[in-house]
Amino acid sequence: MFTHFSRQNSQNCPMRSPFSTCFKTKFQRPGWDIWTICTSLIGLILSLPVLAIFSDLFGDTRAIWHHLATTVLGDYISNSLLLMLGVGIGTAVIGTSTAWLVTLCCFPGRRMFEWALLLPLAAPAYILAYTYTELFEYYGPIQTSLRGWFGWQSVDDYWFPTMRSLPGAIVMLTLVLYPYVYLLARSAFLSQSTSLLEASRSLGCSPWRGFWQVALPLARPAIATGISLALMETLNDFGTVEYFSVSTFTTGIYRTWFGMGDRLAASQLAALLLAFIFGLIVLEQVSRRRQGFYQTACQDLPRYQLLNWRAGLSIFACLLPIGLGFLVPAGVLVQLLVGLSDPTADSRADADFPSADRANPALVSAGGDQFWSFASHSLILALLTAAIAVALSVVLAYGQRLRPGLLNRWATRTATLGYAVPGAVIAVGVLVPLGKFDNALDAWSRASFGVGTGLLLSGTLVALVFAYLVRFLAVSFGAVVASLGAIKPHLDDAARSLGYGRLATLGKIHLPLMRSGLLTAAILVFVDVMKELPATLIVRPFNFDTLAIRVYNLASDERLAEAAAPALAIVAVGLLPVILLSWQMVWSKSKPA
């Protein structure tokens, strides 16, 4: 009976080889080999920061918690919830509407907007915060022009919205995070059944009614996933909310650790933020637990032809987020950079602030030298992290391919959990175990040899790269596992029949075929490391600043003109994944069905 059942399952899975039948894949014992050991170790090591956070939950911090509860804890909770609510609504509206317009409507410029709507992904939210503050502050060009036109003398003569506020932070984060919803919603709209859409038209549904009653419900799971990704990035943000003086959990963790000097309370705040994240993930999954959508789209989708004012309104709806999320900030940064290099260009700064040093040629030269130093630091960290992340992702993906059992599945899930965890939380979780290890090693060395070892890992590049790996391994793993999954198992069997072992098969068969996927994974991790601020700010070694840290420090000192060069560099690097995604979108449309 056992033999008969195993053969029957093998016949039902013709794509499987005799070496990995369906019965064995589902019921085989975990077994220990070098790949299983490696994946388990990687998952265990990368889960240490999260485990360290939860291990501090039971520490005695009643005094500091009483102080936090009576002063700022309420602001942390309310501001975080309001920020999530505002960004969730904003990204859903902009991402879904623009995705529907470029996918199911026809108007001038539609093909350009398909990829141009991804451009705001290149600019971190904190850079938008700095540039819009420069535009809309009291001495900025907008208010200065208004005072000149209407003869106003001071702020008492008129009202103007304040950028450094919770609504301002919501707008900044919405402008850079809506592409998450746009990408997934557009993919969902493209895969929708042509027959359903044509049936809705034959029943008299207008474009708006067809969108609301047919297209939108079918795309709901993808839209919910995109919103959840945007909300995770919202909780991870530090630069924007810190610059706008909005107290959230991320800023609270930083202030509790470095302002109050209480590591244990900072860890407990991080654990509370983790509860927010996990609750968000569970809520998103439960909300669509029993909903399934099965559809086929084997023909080109019928598009609604938009003319006259409808076409103009569609162009405006697509152009507005692109302009506000990318074109305007990039233009402001370029103008600031040009003004910094030209002593006569910034007459407003000289008139209002005679002692301003932004037009000092010597300062510009020194800033240029420092720029290359900060750029080299960012480049070293990004390249090193990308290389290690791709290597670990290959080990995890190949180990799961060889032994797709429960142990390897849990190891990979644990190793890639960090992408859902904010950078400030990961920073705290990294420093806690590394600090304990350094202290224990130093105590042992003093007791045994009378020589202290100091801090070998804490506050070093090792700790910073480790924090990046915990945060961004999921990014590279997703690209690697997708590339490896496209390789049919028959190639593995053919390589083994020729005498190749598992390692040789990986090196000579899989890696050459995965070249484009590995490059994609490396680019995505490289860009994320270049833009990461919270983890870098907390874990970085002393006197080892990156471009992101340089932009943050200069903006905090109100030296926005000097921050233009490193900010533009970060935006330019951020264009790499945008170009890659745009190319993939064009390629997927041009390939034959």
Image (cartoon, rainbow, N blue to C red):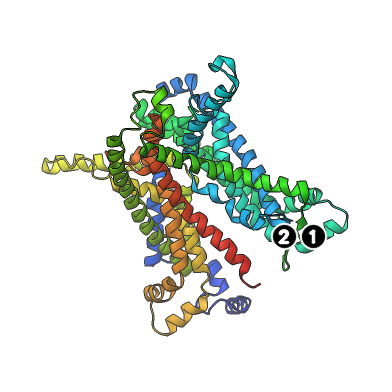
Is 562 on the left-hand or right-hand side of 585? Answer: left
- Identify the residue at horizontal 46%, vertical 73% (top origin): 513
Quadrant (top left, top right, bottom left, bottom right) of the C terminus: bottom right
Residue 535's spot in the image, x, y percent?
39, 41
Q: Quadrant of residue 515?
A: bottom left
**Residue 192 shows which numbered tag?**
2
Residue located 59% across and 61% down the image: 585
Return the x and y of residue 306 as percentages of the image width and height.
Answer: 76, 53
Residue 403 seen anywhere in this rendered image of the structure: no
How far apart marks 1 and 2 lie (CA) works out to: 8 Å
Give 268 or 375, whichever is nearer the viewer.
375
Query: Mark 1 touching mark 2, by CB under 8 A?
Result: yes
Question: Is residue 36 among what the camera can see?
Answer: yes
Q: Residue furthest bottom?
A: 498
Instruction: Tell me what residue is drawn at x 42 percent, y 71 percent.
Output: 511
Q: Taking 521 as reference, is 177 left or right?
A: right
Q: Quadrant of residue 555?
A: top left
Counting from the top left corner in percent of width and height, residue 405 is at 50, 64
